Image (cartoon, rainbow, N blue to C red):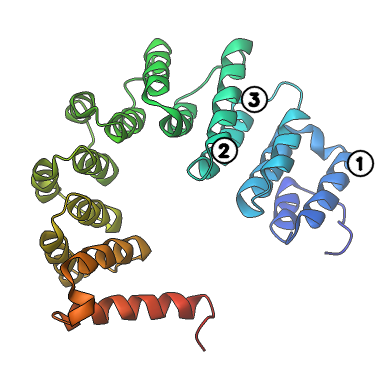
Amino acid sequence: MPPAPPFSSHGDFVAALHRCATLAHLKQLHAHAVVTGRAAAQTTTFHLLRFASLRLSCLPYARRLFDATPGPNVFLYSAMLSAYAAASSHSQEHARDSLALFLRMLRRGRPAPNQFVYPLVLRAACAIGVQLVRSIHCHACKDGFYGHDFIRTSLLDGYSRYGMMGDARKLFDGLTDRNVVSWTALVSGYARAGKVGDAIVLFERMPQRDVPAWNAIIAGCTQNGLFVEAVGIFRRMVDEGFRPNGTTVSCLLSACGHLGMLKIGKDLSIVMLLSLHIMKEHQSKGDIS
């Protein structure tokens, strides 16, 4: 990346940012922003932070940018919490960092959390324990954000992950706009709780489905020993024009393995579909010429 030229507008700066390919390039652009005074604007820090965390997967540098900003606004908090949320599914440490940042936000009083902060924090809480989900639920009610459907959907997902299906169903029934995400969260919750019959009934009632919804019910059947049903639902998924992804393949391999289908070749169409998907995945990664 050549030395950064002067930027006549914020749009020019963002365009240069998207041309960065490495952390060294990002640091060079950041240094230029400091020298020119552009770094004093929190909008600049927001874009740098988002790029460092989401494009370069460099959380430590993103956090350095955040901590170097005096009086970060709610958008910077949201950006940092979003960075942690993207990584928290792979690490409880990131989930704890996210919750610590949220606690700091509450203690300082400014800025106050908004409706976009709570779903991010709830995702981190889900990785730690249901008591934290309950605590954040209380905060959301106290701050007047409980009425937002996407916050209720996040709470629904949190409770269902811990088998608290009474609470989850109450939240689901209270939603004014039940989208595919909320339906899928409840289906997954019933399946995880061993109530696979309820999960299947709910799945059949879904007004629309996407690949994660199909995966949720296939995984639920597989986890509860309903291997024939899992294969049957997979057939329907393919027949209805949905393309299996890696999660689908993993669930089906488990179901087929238990049924012995891969070993004795009783259903070549299933084997061929799985093999075709695996080959396409390898080709997309350049493993097969």
Q: Which marked residue is nearer to the observer: mark 2 or mark 3?
A: 2
Give the left or right position of residue 161, taking residue 8 as reference.
Answer: left
What kind of residue is marked 3? Asn
The residues bearing labels 3 and 1 have C-alpha atoms spaced at a distance of 22 Å
| Viewer can see residue 235 | yes
Residue 39, x across and y down, in percent: 80, 37
The residues bearing labels 2 and 3 have C-alpha atoms spaced at a distance of 17 Å
Within 10 angstroms of label 1, few (less than 14), some, or many (20 or more) residues? few
Mark closer to the chain start, 1 or 2: 1
The quarter of the displayed image where residue 201 is located: top left
Q: Is 134 rendered above or below residue 92?
A: above
Residue 63, x across and y down, in percent: 70, 35
Mark closer to the chain start, 2 or 3: 3
Say which mark, if any, is on residue 73. 3
Q: Residue at x 18, y 29 (%)?
A: 169
Q: Residue at x 80, y 57 (%)?
A: 25
Q: Which residue carries the number 1 mark?
A: 35
Q: Residue at x 75, y 36 (%)?
A: 65
- In terms of secondary structure, where does tag 2 sit? helix
Q: Which marked residue is nearer to the observer: mark 1 or mark 2?
A: 2
What kind of residue is marked 2? Tyr
- In terms of secondary structure, where does tag 1 sit? helix
Q: Which residue carries the number 2 mark?
A: 84
